[in-house]
Image (tube, rainbow, N blue to C red):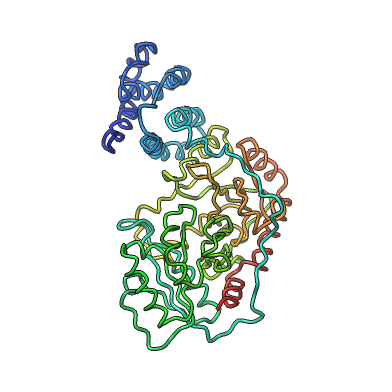
Amino acid sequence: MVSQEKIVSYVESLIYYIAKPAVSERIAASFEIDSLSQADTGAQLLILGALLTTERFDEFSQLTGKLDFNAHTAEERSQLAHCIFTTFSETLLANYATSSRHAAAILELLTVISPEAILAHRSGCESPAGQALIELDYARQISPSVSGTVFSRETSFGPGSRKSEFGYRIQSSLASQGWNVALLPLKELFSYNGPCQQDFVLVDVGVFWKLPPLEQLHDLLAYLKRHFRKIIIFEPDPWTGFYDQLLRSIADRVDYIWGFTPDWDLTQEPCYRGKSIMFPNVGGFEQLAPPHRHELDWNSCSFNFTGSVQGYNLNRVYWILEAIRRNLPLEVQITNPGVDDGLDCERSLKLYIRKLLSSHASLNLATRKDGSRMLTGRAVEVISLNRLLLQECCPALRRYYVEGEHFLEFKEIEELAVSINFLKSHPRVAQTICSQGHQFYLERYSCRKMVEHIQTLL
């Protein structure tokens, strides 16, 4: 078992000679590949760092091809790959125009270390036959007398991480349409005592993980039922499957689950069939960023990727490094939800929105480390902001939007490069697809439509 300290020492070996170019020259000129193939991992990475520093890319590639990380577990290799990318990402992104070969070298090394994670996108991507766009029911008019409460986790990944946004976005969207909706932290769920029964409660499933005894959980749900007519459990990350077994055990005590994606297997099981909310928008952006204030000149099309790179989506390393290697005009802004930005939800979201609005088109990546392709919130967020979405192949998104009409899809880096070059040469086409996607969003998935749809379930 390789400890986190050992992984850090490996990364430190790789970067050791970067600040010592003179020493790197001597080391790089004197090593022999054959003798190093049997050396330990730390020694191999030490030499690789010297070769990278002196830009001896051919020798770097030769040595990389002889490395063998099979003695480490898949999780250890994934952690090492992630740590190496994080270490080099700021340098690569800061020197985008001159780092093409460095990006290629790092990608080659990471592919050897953790090929199953870096190349996960190569798994198949086809829409199930016969699946059409999801049809949703909407109330003809919104009742102003609906009341409810949202209980949400306060941070994304526990202490020290960024404030969780889901509860705030849902509550602000429902309240924007005239509903009387409160937002409370999860800790108040256990002592809630409302003066009268409300129409609904939305509860972040994360709170239930703190209640190991199933009987205690059933008692809590029975208690909530005395205060609320409908209990809705929402799962911000249904792709993990982390809470599926827990949700199965309480299926008879809740009215609906909401997972934001149509390919959540749990929604097709008998216990939740007909008790699932299939709506992709969790709201919030229309109040925070009115589209008319952020119009762009479409005579030239600019592109960005804004998002995190974590162990569970390590495949994003491939796309980012390949984009740099090919000198694609893609601005990359890596975020980290695991670190608190010191901002409240509204200010943090506005900062994120400004990043998405800074370009005409945004890239969204869907593949997880295990090769699954999950619909992420950014897909709908980009379209809702009246920006063009370039989406890595994701069958679930095609249940909500039409590819080629509302967004553009890619499966391989060559396809992405062709799309970017085409859109730069045909800005009117880019603007048309963007406008059609945004109009479709307003007609089906806006905050108002979300409230109209939920009202049919209450």
Q: Does residue 44 sit above or below 85 in this rendering?
A: above
Depth check: give the residue in front, 345 or 191: 191
How many marks overall? 0
Q: Quadrant of residue 22?
A: top left
Image position, residue 260 (x, y; %): 54, 61
Tell me the quarter of the image containing the C terminus.
bottom right
Q: Residue at x 50, y 29 (%)?
A: 104
Q: Does residue 378 sit above or below 233 in this rendering?
A: above
Instruction: Say whether residue 311 is left or right of residue 360.
Output: left
Depth check: give the residue in front, 219 or 68: 219
Depth check: give the residue in front, 369 or 36: 369
Depth check: give the residue in front, 246 or 238: 246
Q: Residue at x 43, y 86 (%)?
A: 197
Q: Residue at x 52, y 72 (%)?
A: 173
Q: Quadrant of residue 166?
A: bottom left
Q: Quadrant of residue 225?
A: bottom left
Instruction: Say whether residue 132 is left or right of residue 348.
Output: right
Q: Does residue 384 sit above or below 75 in this rendering?
A: below
Q: Residue at x 40, y 50 (%)?
A: 336
Image position, residue 49 (x, y; %): 36, 25
Tell me the quarter of the image containing the N terminus.
top left
For this orientation, the residue located farthest to the bottom is: 195
Instruction: Say whether residue 139 is left or right of residue 333.
Output: right
